Every structure is written in structure tokens, then in C-alpha cells.
Amino acid sequence: MKEYDSFRIKCREFVFSYIEPYASLNDTREELDDSVVEAMKRAGYFGAMIPQEYGGLGLNNMQIGILICEIGKSCSASRSLLTVHGMVALAILKWGSDTQRKKYLPKMATGDIIGAFALSEPEVGSDANAIQCTATSFEDNYIINGTKKWITMSKLADVLLVIARLEDKPTAFLVNTKSVGVSATPIRGLMGVRASMMAEWEFNDCVVSYEEMIGNKGMGFAQVGLYSLDYGRYTIAWGNVGACMACLEAATDYSRKRKQFGVPIGKHQLVQKLIAEMVVQTKAAELLCINAAKLKDEKDADSIMETWNAKYFSSCAAKRVVDNAVQIMGGNGVIHGSVVERMYRDVKISEIIEGSNQMHEILIANNIFNNNYN
Amino acid sequence: MDMEAKVKSFLSRYINLDDLENDTNFFELGMVNSLFSMQLVMFLESNIGIELNNDDIKMDNFKSVNAIVKLIKDKKAV
């Protein structure tokens, strides 16, 4: 990991200068400050996951993890922007045509086009194969109808990766958010990651060119969607590690300064127990993420399950770590404006998105019971 | 290790091959989960060294040991 020290410092300086000053404000206003987006554009971070041949930074998975972790230490919503944007960019890179790659990736690398991932619907969450949104062929186009809900960062997005049923088979399409027949209703009032800039999208006879289908008919969820979600889970896991680190730092600092019974509370053994749990949970989550990163960089098929493991554990760890931090900080940990208060709300969201913890438990257990014979 | 052995070695991480014939369709038998095709694509591209395009991604190419071996041979012959 030493070889990544200078990269981590660079990311940390960026976050300190351009993300941290707006993190609490973003949460209060329920939207990302424009300056955060502009700073990410200038730093090239919209292209973090995009190869250099398309104008991106071409970071490896370890570097992406570090970048996301550093952002996650400060602002979960800013992290989620790079998550959903990357999910769309990588889907185009992997399953898109040459024409699509050339059309979208250079502009996505600069942030001139921002992507968002549109799978969930009002009645469809974990059972993603049951999506009701439809696409029908009409001359050289597809006509999309239906509703997508909980679409993170879609208020900022220029293009949505929409999974719809084409001849009853889940299929992926790129839809310009300014297309005729597309309308958005902002979703406000989230408990955590409040600056997610979510919206519900209505597609009412929205015409999409046949060139905007990604992959083939029927590949929308099993290939394109799962591939995007793998990156989503990977980055959320690293974001959780960042939240753990931030809360550990805040609680440790507080425990050194806060005195009760005549000594810093860090001298009290029950507070030490809470800190010890936080240290080990944070390190364990980070190690699972590093393991996933290495396997991804080696293009090892096991990286997929290890990413599920990392996301599952890190979301559980983050919840426990943040809970301990709030417990240590008492009143100062539950007041609005406190970092740990915000993260207490934010980490709950990570137990739900990109596969709920319960879906992770089912899949991880079944992988052992049914599939792993070695 | 020949190609069939390589494929079986990979599949054995996810499927009990003991009672399977080489042409048994393990998708139809429900022996693999939704992530398996992703794992298989990664294996074929990184370990076998073939590049799969969208037209290669179909059940007929992935459904059995024989189908996967045939896909590899076809791609390597191009």
C-alpha cells in the first residue's frame, strides 16, 4: 500500500479543499454544491474509471478505492456521484458499441456528460428481473414507457442507463434526460445521503434511437446491470471504509479532549472497548476492500463475490463504528452539524442500496451452500 | 492442462461436476446463480484470453462444458 501513499495524499488534499467545506451544507440543502461538481471536473475525477484512450485518468481499482475512500471520509453524497457516473461509464466501456464508446466516454471523462443508473421502480427493488418499464421497437427507434424511482444523482445527469423490457426481456438503453417524453420529479426528504439529488422519472412514449441500446436484447440485467452494480457495490464499500475512518478519527480525538471524572474519557475502559471495536471493524472492512481491489486488478472472477463480501461487511462495520462514535460523543454526536450525526444517517443508506444487506446474506450464503465445491 | 480440463477446473469452483455429463445444461438445472455468467465471462477473458463481444453472450455458448469449450475453440480460430 506504500506505493499509493502519494496518490492518497493528493486525494486527501483535494477532499480537504473542495469537498469537506461543503459536506455539511450539501446535507442541509439536499443538493451538491455546484463547486463540488466543478472541482471534480477540474481534477478529472469523473474520468477516474475511464481509460486514458478515452480521456479518462485510467486509475486502477486500488486507486479508485483510495479516491472513493477519501471522498467517503468527508461526504457520502459526493462519493455517490462518482459511483453512479462510473456505473454508467463502465457499462458503456464494457458492453457498448464503438460508436457509443466514442460518443459518450470522452465527455463522461470530463464530466461534460454525467450518467445515472435507472433500474429501480416504484414497485421493483431487490427483484430486479421484475421491472415493468417497457421498450417497444418502432421503425429505427425504441419507445420507452414506465417509471423509474430512487435514481441517484439523476437531477444532475445528462444520460440515464435505463433497464426496460424489450419483448419481455430486460434490456439496457441510454436515454438523454432532455428527451421529449421524459420528466423528473425530485425526491427530497431522505434520511441519509441527503444530497443524492434523486428523482423519479416518467417515460411517456420516449423515443430512443436503436443506436442507444447497450448490449443485446435480454442482456440488460444479467450482463449490463450486474456489471454496473458490481462497480456500485465496490465503491460503496470503499465509501463505508471512509466513513469508518472519519468516525474513528472524530471519536478518538474527542476521547482525548473530553474529560469526565477528572480524566479524558479515553482513559475509561468502556470507552476503550468502543474504540477497539471501531479500530478492528475499520481495518477489517478496509482489508476486504483491498482484497477486492487486487482481485479486480487481476481480473479474477472471484472478485465479484469478494466485492459482495466487502460491501456487506463494510456496511455492517460502518453502522457499528458510527454508532460507537455517536455513543462516545454523546450530545455532541447527535446534534446537527456534527460529522458523526450526518454519517450515522448516511451509513444506514449503504445497507439498502446496490443490494440490501439481506440480499447480500442470501447470495453470500447460497454461494457457499450451492456453488462452492472447493 | 487441455482446454476442457481448464474449463472444468474453473466450473468446479461453482458447480459440483461429479454427476454431470459434458453436455448437461447447468443453467436449466438451476445450478448457477445470476452472477455466474459474469464470473464465466471474466474467466474466459482473463484466464483463457479470448475477447467476448455482445453477440457471444448467449445461453447457448455458456450452458455446458461442451458449449464453453466450443466457444473458446471458435474464438481462438478467428
Image (cartoon, coloured by chain):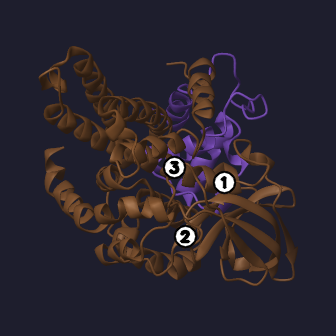
Question: Is residue A348 toward the left or the right of residue A328 in the image?
Answer: right
Q: Report the front residue among A301 and B60.
A: A301
Counting the numbered discs, the total is 3
User: Considering depth in this image, is A14 or A232 the residue closer to the camera?
Assistant: A14
Q: Which kind of residue does numbered mark 3 sit on?
A: Gly
Any part of residue A246 in sight? yes
Tag nearer the camera, 1 or 2 = 2
Residue behind mark 1: B57
- Asked if labels 3 and 1 share a chain, the reply is no
Residue picked out by circle 2:
A115
Whether A60 is drawn above or below A46: the answer is above
Q: CA distance from mark 1 to mark 2?
A: 25 Å
Q: Are marks 1 and 2 in contact (CB under 8 Å)?
A: no
Q: Colour of chain B?
A: purple
Q: Report x, y in % for residue B53.
A: 59, 61
Q: Do the numbered discs 3 and 1 sit on residues whose CB atoms are within 8 Å?
A: no
